[in-house]
């Protein structure tokens, strides 16, 4: 079974530029998550999708971050414009169902450096 | 509110000696708890999970954890460390309800010396 795929793996941009990350979850997984992991910290949830609907985006900085999952499969996360503090690893995860106790499967992440 | 506290940011052990990574949790409800491991430049991998069944949970690679409600703890142990265990370990609590939102601890870096 193929795992969660993410691209690109690394990205370096200047502040005020825009950037987009792509995620392909495990086949058949209805729930998709985007996390931000700042160096030295645990991942923090940015947004959760159930199929193509948003379940939780309370931690997403909506003035600069956006995400979509148009057909309930792949997802993109965009930052526009980027700030220095956005430097982090962006992790995508998926699970077969949402709810307490269900395992989330993580992709390798995209490491973003904003200069 | 749910939260986890990992009591050590860095643990160093010698190969072949026991490993203990400590985690305390705070939860208003019966929690689901996880341990994830993150090797450099790799994704997070589930080691084990507790979901109100047996309090002693066995995971992959010889790791296990014991849920102690009286102490609000969920410490991760392994009898004998291997060089390949060197990684970042996260204790995680799942939010009750139908979202499955995870709250991660700050992480513990495990160093294994030869």
Image (cartoon, rainbow, N blue to C red):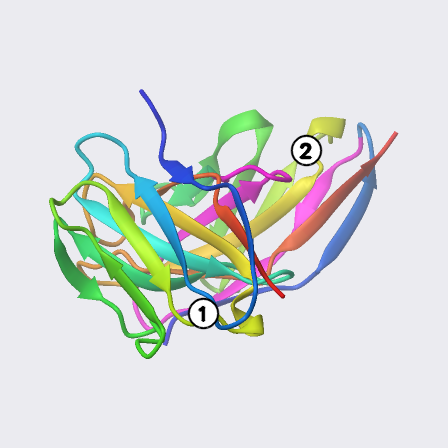
Above or below — where is A46 with respect to A95? below
Give, as a single range, the part of the protein colored magenta. B17-44
Is A19 displayed left or right of B52 in the figure? right
Is B21 magenta? The answer is yes
Badge 2 density bin: few <14, some 14–19, many ≥20, Cα 10 Å? some
Which residue matches tag 1?
B3
Which residue matches tag 2?
B85
The answer to which image quadrant residue A49 occupies is bottom left
Is B104 displayed left or right of B22 in the figure? left
The quarter of the rendered structure image containing the C terminus of chain A is bottom right
Looking at the image, which residue is at 26% across and 69% down?
A57
Q: Secondary structure at mark 1?
A: strand
Badge 1 density bin: few <14, some 14–19, many ≥20, Cα 10 Å? some
Looking at the image, which residue is at 75% across and 55% down?
B10
Circles 1 and 2 on the same subunit? yes
Is A30 displayed left or right of A111 in the figure? left
Above or below — where is B52 with respect to A47? above
Label number found at residue B64: none
Sooner in the amino-acid sequence: mark 1 or mark 2: 1
The quarter of the rendered structure image containing the N terminus of chain A is top left
Looking at the image, which residue is at 64% across and 40% down?
B40
Image coords of residue B14 (percent x, y): 85, 35
Image coords of residue B47 (percent x, y): 49, 37
Please state the chain letter of the residue tagged with numbered disc 2 in the rendered image.
Answer: B
Q: Secondary structure at mark 2?
A: helix
């Amino acid at each position: 079974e193929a795992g969660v795929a993410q691209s690109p793996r690394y990205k370096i941009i200047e502040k005020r530029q825009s950037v987009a990350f792509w995620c392909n979850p495990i086949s058949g997984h209805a729930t998709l998550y985007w996390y931000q992991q700042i160096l030295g910290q645990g991942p923090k949830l940015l947004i959760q999708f159930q199929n193509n609907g948003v379940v939780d985006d309370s931690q997403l900085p909506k003035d600069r971050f956006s995400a979509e999952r148009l057909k309930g499969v792949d997802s993109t996360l965009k930052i526009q414009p980027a700030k220095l503090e956005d430097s982090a690893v962006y992790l995508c995860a998926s699970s077969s169902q949402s709810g307490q106790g269900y395992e989330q499967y993580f992709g390798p992440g995209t490491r973003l450096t904003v200069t | 509110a749910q939260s986890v506290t990992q009591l050590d940011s860095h643990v160093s052990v010698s190969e072949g000696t026991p490993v203990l990574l400590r985690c305390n949790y705070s939860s208003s409800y019966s929690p689901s708890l996880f341990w994830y491991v993150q090797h450099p430049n790799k994704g997070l991998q589930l080691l084990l999970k507790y979901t109100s069944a047996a309090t002693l949970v066995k995971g992959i690679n010889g790791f296990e954890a014991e849920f102690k409600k009286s102490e609000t703890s969920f410490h991760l142990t392994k009898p004998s460390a291997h060089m390949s265990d060197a990684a970042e370990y996260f204790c995680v609590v799942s939010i009750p309800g139908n979202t499955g939102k995870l709250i991660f601890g700050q992480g513990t870096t495990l160093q294994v010396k030869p």
